[in-house]
Image (cartoon, coloured by chain):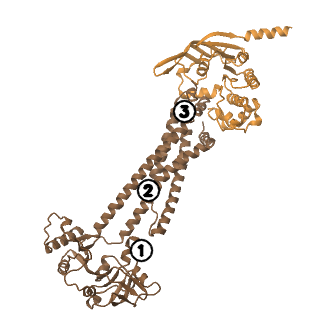
Amino acid sequence: MPSTNHSNGLNGNGNSTLIETRKLCKSYFNDELETPVLFDIDLTINKNEFIAIMGPSGSGKSTLMHILGFLDHHTGGEYLFHGKHAQEMDEDTLAKVRATRVSFVFQAFNLLPRASVLQNVMLPLIYHPTIPASERLERTKKAIEAVDLTDHSDYLSNQLSGGQKQRVAIARALVTEPEVIFADEPTGNLDSTSGIQVMQALQELHSNGHTIILVTHEQATADHADRIIELFDGRITKDTNKFKTRKAKRENSLKK
Amino acid sequence: MLIKDTFSAAFEGLHRSRLRSMLTTLGIVIGVGSVVLMVSVGASFERYILDQVESFSGDTFEIHAKGIQDVGKDVLSITFGDLEAIRDLTTVQNVAPAIFLTDRISYGREEIAPFIFGTTKEIFINWSLKIDQGRLLTDGDDKGAKSVTVLGSQAAEDLFPNENPLGKKITVGSRKFTVVGVIEAMGSPLAEQMDSIVYVPFSVAKAIQGRSTYIDYIALQSKGGDNELTRRDIVALLRQRHNIDNPEDDGDKDDFYARSFEQAMDIINTVTMSITLFLGLIAGISLLVGGVGIMNIMLVSVTERTKEIGLRKAVGARRMDILLQFLLEAIVLTLLGGIIGVIGALGFGLLLTAIANKLLGGITYAITLSSILLPLITAIVVGLIFGIYPARKAAKLSPIEAMGYE
């Protein structure tokens, strides 16, 4: 059994297990024709990790992230979240996990069209089972402030630039203060300046104690992460934890 | 998710896609409106026709000759003997014989060519005619062969556009008649001809036409309320007197007609019923077309929002939250569209009947509650089913499928 030590979770360097997969598989079925995408993924992710999943297109990296983020179902093996089996969760439990524990930043932003920044960021709160309605506005404003869009609160989503849209999406992802934020190619549709802003925002969330898991095929984006998992043809080919390396470097520079 | 949130999500959803909401509503307005309009115009027309015939007593019978008519020659088959024999029947009452005159009538410079009935006072009972001014014909007029006349309302108006006709002498052919009464107008276009009839005493018409054998027409009423019994009685008597062997009761073999107003009304009823059926059929088709239209627009507009459903699920919406939101949206759209459709159709129907009333007269707007509720409920049910069905389907997908990945 994986360790589920909560008290040791939020301070970064702890090793309390958040996510664990055992021989996780995913296949798509089309008219009984099976197309396997993920094979035997064994993975352990601890709280407050900053992970980049890399790989060429078709390697299954997005699918893996969707499964970890409860947006899709796996078809083989086991997926444990806080030690609980995902396949044993019913629809309402899944909805609750999506509302409270995880959130997503999509490559295509996926904002509500013709809705204001405020409405978009507030959206997850109306489905949140415990945050009272009276706190919604305050939390929403705080989240918008965190991505520097307070001046644009009343803008409609289609009046924003790509970078601004992605920051709205990030604000929406952090408004419920979830444990894990998943980001699917968050800089994929952005110019480099906006991309850097978005990555800085994610970095900040990480330093505030959130677990960040992002998918990218750009090395520069992946370099922000502490741990890089590389996928090829549905299998993990490389899993590098840079945390120790970086820590060592920092200590070295302090000595000098 | 709170109910309040469901409401605001639904209304925001409708507001964000104003054009689509408006088009959906319009589709429902047309679907519901056309059915309500169809049915109400049909019902108004039907009532108009029924109003026309309602004033006649169904117990009244008309008997007249029937046969191949030579040009310019009256077909005559009912005799004075027939009349007396009919009077002796126990199943009849208020027997009123008539001989027609075809003379022109003039007063001053006004001249008309009306239908002139030489008849007795019973005709007014049989035809449910009421006096407007003066008096009706009496037995004394007939016995005394007095040159008096009672005018139908239209005939009186044509001859006396600016004068009171009572006591005036009018010229019928070459004789002078004193106007003693004017009949109350029937008021409906179908009875316009009856309003133009001029009545004179039977004995006078008989003398003018020089009749001693045949009469033109008999009106009477059944006694005892059994019209069929009266009809059999009359028909059997006349067949015997006219030497017609007709045990099959085949009307084509007779040389006379003997028909009650009830039978005539049955024919009219058959006509109005087929009109009603026809309009009902059209309404049914409109309902079907409207329903299919509502179905399509709801299917499309909800299916179009599968992505939004996926997103809402991704941020934590339960299936129930999604379903309630779309249920509410569908209720708002169908109710709004349905109510606007009904109001619009009622307004348009009122306008149409007002125009028809100007042209024909005697038309009032008729609508039944069921012809409002049926299309309204159909629209709502269809709208709800096809608003929720795709939403339910989308809510069952995993968020990622609904958002259109893969």
Q: Secondary structure at mark 3?
A: helix
Q: What residue is at 68 percent from the left and 13 percent from the top? A: A228
| Residue B19 point in image, percent of width and height | 60, 44
Residue B226: tell me if it is visible.
Answer: no
Q: Secondary structure at mark 2?
A: helix
Q: Which mark is residue B39?
A: 2
Tag 2, which chain? B
What count of labels does the image hold?
3
Alpha carbon distance from label 2 to label 3: 41 Å
Three-letter code for the amino acid on which mark 2 is drawn: Val
Alpha carbon distance from label 1 to label 3: 65 Å
Chain B pictured colour: brown
Disc 1 to disc 2: CB gap under 8 Å: no
Q: What is the letter of the orange chain?
A: A
Q: Quadrant of the N terminus of chain A?
A: top right
| Residue B11 point in image, percent of width and height | 61, 43
Q: Which mark is residue B187?
A: 1
Characterize the local packing of mark 3: few (<14), some (14-19) or many (20 or more) Cα atoms within 10 angstroms: many
Q: Which mark is residue B359?
A: none
Q: Which mark is residue B319?
A: 3
Is residue B41 positioned above or below B314 on the image? below
Alpha carbon distance from label 1 to label 2: 26 Å
Tag 1, which chain? B
Characterize the local packing of mark 2: few (<14), some (14-19) or many (20 or more) Cα atoms within 10 angstroms: many
Q: Nearer the viewer, residue B112 or B44?
A: B112
